[in-house]
Image (cartoon, rainbow, N blue to C red):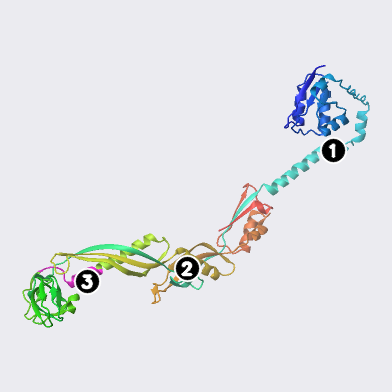
Amino acid sequence: MKTKIITLESHDDLISVRDKLSWAKTPRILLVWPKYEKVTLRLLDLKVLQRHADSLGAQLGLVTRRANVRRDAESLGIPVFKSTVSAQKDLWPASAPRTQRTPPPPRRDLRAMRDEVYEKEPAWRTSLLGRVVTFTAGVTAILVLAGLFVPRAAVIVHPETRMESIVIPVSASPSFEAVSITGNVTARTISVTVDVEQSKAVSGVVSLPKTKARGVAQFMNLTADEVTIPAGTIVSAAPSIRFVTLNDARLPAGVDEIVAVRIEALAGGSDGNVGVGAVQFVEGSLGLSMTVSNPEPLAGGIDVKGIGANEADRERLRESVLQEVQHTAEEQIRSQIGTNDLLLTETLEITEVLMEEFSPPVGEAGSSLNLRMQIVVSALYIFSTDLEQLASSTMNAAIPQGFVPQGELTFELLSMPVTDTSGTTYFDLNVTQTIRRNIDILEILSSIRGKKLEQAQSELQSRFILREEPQITITPSWWNYLPLIPFNISVEVN
């Protein structure tokens, strides 16, 4: 008899083996367990496979050496063989005959049984009047529910408002680390480098040097050694009139030995014309080895009149440049800090002059005077957030009971800031904010829900202090009552 041999694999389960049985078209189906792999089929799975093979008209057999599988198969009456060869040679035990269930004959009294189980509807429910009354009650219930949940209302109330203003004495210093309700705020330092150049026309007459004074200087040795005096050695006369030697010279060895050297004034003009004995100082280390004097007057320095800038012109131009420096520095600092940050302009100060250059320099003619200055300017400023924090905390503490803040804080300086010697800046800050009377929304809802429109408006005006009439909008517009359910009412307080 033909036998379908199916070799199982380790991944096979009940579903996959059952599908393999379905493809078998033989009267015998033999399931072969692998030797070295484990197939997880339980006793219940074998019972299901046996019934499935029986439904296909085939007899199920197993080939396995596993004791537990053989034991389960024998309990179910499934033949077990040692090999596929023995399964094909040996006789298979006859399978138990299948029993067929015979359905019982249909019962004839089902309608009577149904009538006994189910009670008949009352007569009022089957009558026309009862149906009309029931329908009317249902429609009425729907309308009541619609009246509860469909209407919507929007209420806008305008409570009393007033302008609250307070003055805060503020102290600002870089030494303060945080904002304090006592008025202390942190002042931060900012520095900018300003490069300004200005020109000024001059028409004054000034003395201009034309030639330099010349003469002879006599050096006296203070040591026992010979001393070399190089050309270019600087000697001077009070007050700060300097001369330079024109040639090299050797001062003989021995105390009080002398040598004469020609000298010339470093600067031109009549200032170099000095009398006998005016030259007294030797600059540099040579001054330790010798003394100097002029045995004859020094002459030859001549001044001429010309158009140029005097000291007053230079001072006026310098003041003008410094004013522009301060203005430019303020603009640069404002561009680097926040828009609402407070710059303490009175703390603007020059911290370092990097360059100050006049053109033409002193002693030269010119119809115009030019000055270029490069200056480092520093100042103190306060973060707007620090001022807002101080103003907000102070205002919240000053708001009367029953009111809440509304709108933004505004603040302005009432007095010019003043900085003391310790670097602390003092000023008064005026803080202004609109406050409104606090209204409980739950109290509004409890006072108007379910009432007519006119009654609700009158109730709001009598219960609360309002600056304007309340606005109530009901949807749909033809509905004249406010909803009973609070969450169908939206309240806005302006």
Query: Residue at image x 45%, y 66%?
Result: 411
Residue at position x 80%, y 38% from top?
132
Of the 4 image quadrants, the one containing the N terminus is top right
Distance (Cα) linking label 2 and label 1:
77 Å
Discs 2/3, front: 3
Dot 3 alpha-carbon crowd within 10 angstroms: few under 14, some 14 to 19, many 20 or more: few
Closest to the observer, 382 or 70: 70
Q: Residue at x 75, y 44 (%)?
A: 140
Residue 226 visible here? yes
Q: Secondary structure at mark 2?
A: strand
In terms of sequence position, does the residue under pointer 2 or pointer 1 come before the other?
A: 1
Q: Residues within 10 Å of mark 1 (few under 14, many from 20)?
A: few
Q: Which residues are magenta?
A: 306-319
Residue at image point 47% right, 63% down: 385
Q: Which residue is mark 3?
A: 315
Residue 65 spot, x, y in % from top left: 81, 30
Q: Amino acid at mark 1?
A: Arg
Q: CA separation, marks 2 and 3?
A: 44 Å
Magenta-colored stretch includes residue 352: no
| Residue 431 circle label | 2
Which label is found at residue 318? none
Q: Which residue is mark 1?
A: 125
Up/down of 58 relative to 221, above or below? above
Disc 3 residue type (three-letter): Glu
Question: Which of the two labelled residues, at mark 1 and mark 3, occupies the earlier sequence position?
Answer: 1
Which three-letter amino acid code belongs to the residue tagged 2?
Val
Query: Residue 221: horizontal and vertical position, in percent?
Result: 13, 80
